[in-house]
Structures are given as structure tokens and as C-alpha cells.
């Protein structure tokens, strides 16, 4: 089963809606994982109850940690004893807008073996069109070949993650973002350096930020 991972480090109410959307709009077999990143005790109690009710795997951290570290923790846990060729990662402020998004996304990854990361939220491309290298036609949907993509909604080839070695911890905290940049960008750059995989982004978002009006 394909692991779908949510990093809970913002708002539980939005995360809970995302969990429900994933279960409602995902027909392909999957296993949902949530990592609670140092949330308050009263919130954590509700998260634990919801995990039992909705039957998803939950990892809890007592202290808040950087995004790169918590992504590495939950991804490696989800892939342990799991031979899935792909996994999916979401930030907790996303929402899923397309039914059967995972089935279509995996078809793209199966068809295009050179893709290491498929971005399913294209909202951020508008503020950096220099990142778009070319357009790629595909029977499911048109795609953009890009040189960067925010990691808030990715389908990732497991071989890519293993080859890169995970997210760089030096880029995973708020303090380090100004000095080093974002861990998403570093992961993509490492992928380009260490593998022949590419990054594609779909033309129309299948997942969007809660605040987005697009």
C-alpha cells in the first residue's frame, strides 16, 4: 500500500479535514500516517482518539522539531517493511480538490519513469515562472518540467528519497531558512546532483492551500 504522510505542525482542525478528504477522495489502496509535531496535550488527546476512529498510524513527538527532521522520521517509519515504489507527503494546511488524485498521479509516475517528484499543487509556480523549463503532454493532464517545487503536496518515488538520503537537517528549521533556504529546495537540488530523476508539476492543482482562492 502507498503511504500517505501528513505532517501536523500547524492546526489540527485543518489537518482533520485533510484526513477526511484523503479518505473520501482516494480510491487507490493506501496507508495514512500522521506525525504530530509537539502539539499541545489537549489537542494530542483528540488526535489520538481520531487516529483510533479513522484507523491511521500516528507518531507523536513531545517537542516541536524542524520540518526536515519530522519528515525524515515519518517517511522512514512508513517505508519500513513496505516495498511501495512511491509515497505521498502533505503539509497539514492543504486540502484535496480532485477525486481519484492518487490513481491518476501513480499512473503518471508509472508512465514517466524519469520522474522523481510529482508536485500536485502548482499554486506557487506563478511567482517564479523561471522555474518552468518546458511543458509535457500526458493523457491524464498536461505537466510542467520544473527546477523547483514546494514540498507541501508531493508524490515521491521511493528510490529518489533513498538516493538523496532524506531531507537535509541543516535546512529544516525556521532559523536556518534565512541562512540556507528551504529543505524542499535542498532535497530537489540533491536529487538533481545524485540522480537522473526530474521534477514535474501538474498544470492544474489537485491539492491547494486552505487559504487559496484559486
Image: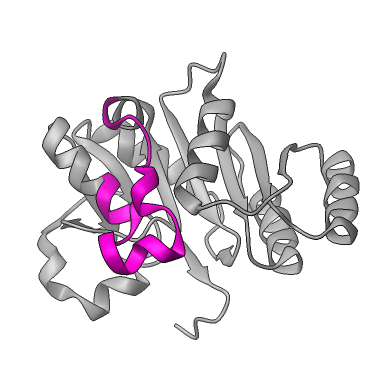
Seen at 35% across and 61% down, the residue is 150
In the image shown, does 214 or 14 lie closer to the viewer? Answer: 14
What residue appears at the point 51 percent right and 53 percent down from the top-left corner? 66
Assess whether residue 185 is covered by the magenta stretch: yes
Classify residue 153 by image quadrant: bottom left
In the image: residue 16, left or right of residue 173: right
The picture places residue 2, in percent across and down from the top left corner, at 54, 31
Q: Quadrant of the N terminus?
A: top right
Tell me if 46 is positioned left or right of 75 in this view: right
Q: Please state which of residues 37 and 26 is positioned toward the viewer in this rendering.
A: 37
Does residue 69 appear to the left or right of 43 in the view shown? Answer: left
Q: Is residue 208 magenta?
A: no
The quadrant where residue 95 appears: bottom right
- Residue 141 appears anywhere in the view: no
Q: Give the residue drawn at x 39%, y 55%.
A: 151
- The magenta-colored residue range is 163-187
Q: Position of residue 84 (x, y in %)?
A: 48, 22
User: Is residue 104 visible to us here?
Assistant: yes
At x 45%, y 65%, the residue is 174
Q: Which is nearer the eye, 20 or 43?
A: 43
**Quadrant into which the C terminus falls:** bottom left
Amino acid at each position: 500500500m502507498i503511504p500517505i504522510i501528513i505532517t501536523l505542525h500547524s492546526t489540527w482542525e485543518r489537518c482533520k479535514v485533510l484526513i477526511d478528504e484523503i479518505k473520501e477522495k482516494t480510491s487507490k489502496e493506501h496507508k495514512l500516517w500522521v506525525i504530530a509535531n509537539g502539539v499541545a496535550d489537549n489537542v494530542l488527546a483528540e488526535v489520538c482518539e481520531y487516529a483510533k476512529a479513522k484507523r491511521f498510524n500516528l507518531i507523536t513527538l513531545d517537542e516541536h522539531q524542524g520540518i526536515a527532521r519530522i519528515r525524515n522520521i515519518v517517511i522512514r517509519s512508513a517505508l519500513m517493511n513496505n516495498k511501495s515504489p512511491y509515497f505521498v507527503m502533505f503539509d497539514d494546511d492543504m486540502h484535496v480538490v480532485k477525486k481519484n488524485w492518487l490513481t491518476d498521479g501513480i499512473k503518471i509516475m508509472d508512465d514517466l519513469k524519469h520522474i522523481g517528484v510529482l508536485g500536485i499543487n502548482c499554486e506557487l509556480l506563478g511567482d517564479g515562472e523561471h522555474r518552468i523549463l518546458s511543458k509535457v503532454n500526458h493523457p491524464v493532464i498536461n505537466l510542467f518540467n520544473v527546477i523547483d517545487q514546494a514540498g507541501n503536496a508531493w508524490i515521491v518515488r521511493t528510490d529518489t528519497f533513498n538516493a538523496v538520503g532524506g531531507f537535509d537537517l541543516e535546512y529544516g528549521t525556521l532559523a536556518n531558512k534565512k541562512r540556507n533556504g528551504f529543505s524542499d529546495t535542498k532535497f530537489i537540488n540533491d536529487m538533481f546532483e545524485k540522480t537522473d530523476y526530474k521534477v514535474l508539476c501538474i498544470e492544474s492543482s489537485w491539492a491547494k492551500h486552505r487559504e487559496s482562492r484559486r
